[in-house]
Image (tube, rainbow, N blue to C red):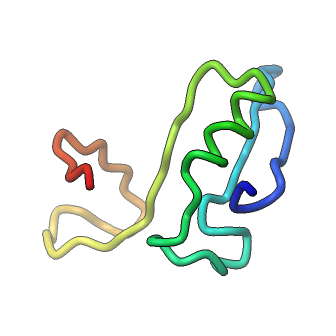
Amino acid sequence: QPSDALILGKIKNVDCVLLARHGRHHTVMPSNVNYRANIWALKEENCSHVLVSTACGSLREEIQPGDLVIIDQFIDR
């Protein structure tokens, strides 16, 4: 089962699908996210791209709340 129901909509007339990977109410712990089911559900909706966002804080003063940061490194477990 995917983490939650898919939400279908449009952004500037482009079909989009939203999936809360931890559930809309954050009920799925990170170690329990069924990534395979999530990707399968997106595939079933004919999604061609997957964009993932995350929210976290920073200890750097130049990064203020509300700033958008694009990472150039990540840890793949």
Q: Position of residue 9 (x, y in %)?
A: 86, 37
Q: Position of residue 59 (x, y in %)?
A: 16, 75
- Residue found 83% across the figure and 47% down from its top: 7
- Residue found 70% across the figure and 51% down from its top: 19
Quadrant in which the N terminus appears: bottom right
The residue lying toward the viewer, choosing from 65 and 41, is 41
Check the image and report above or below for 38 versus 16.
below
Quadrant in which the C terminus appears: bottom left
- Residue found 30% across the figure and 42% down from its top: 70
- Residue found 65% across the figure and 47% down from its top: 38
Quarter of the image for residue 55 reads bottom left
Check the image and report above or below for 39 versus 19.
above
Quarter of the image for residue 62 reads bottom left
The residue lying toward the viewer, choosing from 32 and 10, is 32
Number of marks in the rendered image: 0
Q: Position of residue 36 (x, y in %)?
A: 57, 45
Check the image and report above or below for 53 versus 29.
above
Q: Position of residue 64 (x, y in %)?
A: 30, 66
